[in-house]
């Protein structure tokens, strides 16, 4: 009996068995991580109160000296797409919290470093991404549990928080002046009807060269970085002012189309000039009839808003004139003066005017002149900050620092919780997440442990930038937190570890939570990218 022939398996592979080359995907992922880490390393040295400053030289020859993470990254010409995501990350943090722009980029860089080692160990990017998301949610819960509630009536706590933000800036020596100023500015614009919302557009920062940062002041009223129009002996001070904000021109009308008028004799010339005078006089009589004695004239792009002739008649009518008011300032001015902008001379009525005790031109020595409006009746919820500085670099940095301090106070209005600074929350997070990772199973445990290790970059960098031994400091910090001192942090002034809450180094909870959430989101996005497609 013949035995049946055994059928040999066919060597043709099916689709599921085909070989896929993943080398390119890995290379692109690693290239993205390397580029993003390079950006993070560039700003890492500027973290903390002892951080270094960066001098940025633009193509136009402008020089900026700053250690504000958002400003540094904004001015950098980053070409790699993944590295651009870190620039956008710092902008997001600037919008959400206003402070912690360097912190968020440094955390993202540390997370990417940990992800690189996890990827090299063969863990799939999706597994890492999901674990990072869980870890960031747990981190926010831990931070919220650590936070101390604060009331807006507790002015000292708000000032401490604003001071902490200013301590890492170029103008840190002026923090005792700028911190209370920022707190008063924000509290003065909080609307009782919406106690959790603050619009920082209601705080106008006016920069004026000259003097020192010590001369910076909060002005309850309006400040214009302009002179009063002195043509034909115009007024420079008016009391019991009735102020009109006008958006039309007090000058002879022009034709809508480009054309030339030929004047054949002097009588016609006289008639034209006479009509111009009568036209302007007619407008000024209507203005004067309402009792108006101060005019704020919007800048015009079509023709001159005022001419020498109209300024002459306005001076005779005893009306003070401030011209060339920018279009985007009109809303702020009308809100402050509680008046309405007037778009046409026919609509000029007394009820549209604003009222103030005094409008005057103030000389600032070598710094030129400004116009101040004080004692405004029914003033809107706005305020002005007049920032002074000896040179343009200091002036710009003072404005950026003040903006960060205002944002910190705004964070506390939105979410009324304070948290310790000085690397204390990051070490506590690292400790608690490390303990949580031991409870988890599988790959998730490895990923959460890596997340916990990455957070140690903040205290490590703070110590490194302050010239301390980072390994000794971070080890001691871990030890203190393990013993239950959750507010132990790095005191860079004393060069040792102390209870950071007692040292008044505090920051809003929103700054820390948004930094961790946004950094994790950004890292997860970079991890998920496995190819870059260029479209021409």
Image (cartoon, helix red, strand yellow):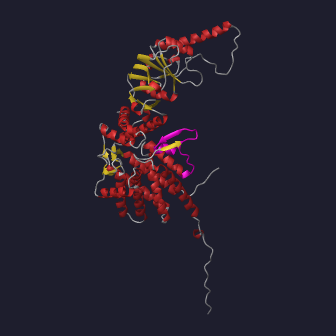
Q: Is residue 482 visible?
A: yes
Quadrant, the N terminus = bottom right
Total number of numbered discs in the rendering: 0
**Residue at 56% across, 41% down:** 58
Q: Is residue 145 visible?
A: no
| 75 in the magenta segment | yes
Q: Give the magenta part as a residue range.
A: 57-82
| x, y percent for residue 85 | 52, 49
| x, y percent for residue 18 | 60, 69
| x, y percent for residue 32 | 54, 55
Instruction: Pick the residue in front: 526 or 100.
Output: 100
| x, y percent for residue 385 | 41, 31
Query: In this picture, is 366 found above or below 451?
Result: above
| 261 in the magenta segment | no
State the image quarter where residue 154 is shown: top left
Query: In this picture, is 189 found above or below 129?
Result: above
**Residue at 54% across, 11% down:** 281
On screen, residue 304 versus residue 469, left or right, reads right
**Residue at 38% across, 37% down:** 174
Q: Residue furthest top?
A: 267
């Amino acid at each position: 009996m013949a035995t049946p022939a055994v059928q040999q398996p066919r060597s043709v592979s099916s689709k599921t068995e085909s070989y896929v080359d993943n080398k390119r995907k890995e290379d692109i992922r690693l290239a993205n991580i390397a580029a993003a880490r390079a950006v993070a390393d560039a700003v890492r040295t500027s973290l903390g109160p002892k951080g270094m400053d960066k001098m940025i030289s633009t193509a136009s020859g402008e020089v900026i000296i700053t250690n504000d993470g958002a400003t540094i990254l904004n001015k950098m010409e980053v070409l790699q797409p993944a590295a651009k995501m870190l620039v956008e990350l710092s902008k997001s943090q600037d919008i959400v919290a206003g402070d912690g722009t360097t912190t968020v980029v440094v955390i993202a860089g540390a997370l990417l470093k940990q992800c690189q080692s996890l990827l090299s160990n063969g863990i799939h990017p999706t597994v890492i991404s999901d674990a990072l998301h869980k870890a960031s949610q747990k981190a926010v819960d831990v931070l919220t549990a650590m936070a101390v509630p604060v009331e807006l009536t507790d002015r000292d706590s708000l000032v401490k928080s604003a001071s902490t933000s200013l301590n890492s800036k170029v103008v840190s020596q002026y923090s005792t002046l700028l911190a209370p100023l920022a707190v008063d500015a924000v509290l003065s614009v909080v609307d009782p009807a919406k106690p959790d919302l603050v619009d920082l557009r209601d705080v106008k920062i006016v920069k004026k060269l000259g003097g020192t940062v010590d001369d910076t002041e909060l002005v309850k009223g309006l400040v214009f970085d302009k002179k009063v129009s002195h043509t034909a002996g115009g007024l420079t001070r008016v009391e019991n002012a009735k102020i009109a904000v006008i958006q039309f021109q007090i000058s002879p009308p022009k034709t809508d189309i480009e054309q030339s008028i030929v004047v054949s004799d002097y009588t016609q010339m006289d008639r034209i000039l006479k009509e111009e005078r009568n036209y302007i006089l007619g407008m000024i009589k209507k203005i004067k009839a309402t009792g108006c004695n101060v005019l704020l004239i919007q800048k015009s792009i079509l023709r001159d808003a005022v001419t020498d002739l109209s300024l002459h008649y306005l001076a005779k009518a005893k009306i003070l004139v401030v011209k060339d008011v920018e279009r985007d300032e009109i809303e702020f001015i009308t809100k402050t003066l509680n008046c309405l902008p007037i778009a046409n001379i026919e609509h000029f009525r007394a009820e549209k005017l604003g009222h103030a005790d005094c409008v005057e031109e103030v000389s600032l020595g070598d710094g030129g002149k400004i116009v101040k409006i004080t004692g405004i009746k029914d003033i809107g919820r706005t305020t002005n900050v007049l920032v002074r500085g000896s040179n343009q670099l200091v002036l710009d940095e003072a404005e950026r620092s003040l903006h960060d301090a205002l944002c910190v106070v705004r964070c506390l209005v939105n979410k009324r919780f304070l948290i310790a600074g000085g690397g204390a929350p990051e070490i506590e997070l690292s400790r608690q997440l490390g303990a949580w990772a031991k409870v988890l199973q599988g790959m998730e445990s490895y990923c959460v442990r890596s997340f916990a290790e990455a957070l140690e970059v903040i205290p490590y960098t703070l110590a490194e930038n302050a010239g301390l031994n980072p390994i000794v400091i971070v080890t001691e910090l871990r030890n203190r937190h393990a013993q239950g001192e959750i507010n132990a942090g790095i005191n860079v002034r004393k060069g040792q570890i102390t209870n950071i809450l007692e040292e008044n180094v505090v920051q809003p909870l929103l700054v820390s939570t948004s930094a961790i959430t946004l950094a994790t989101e950004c890292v997860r996005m970079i991890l998920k990218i496995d190819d870059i497609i260029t479209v021409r």
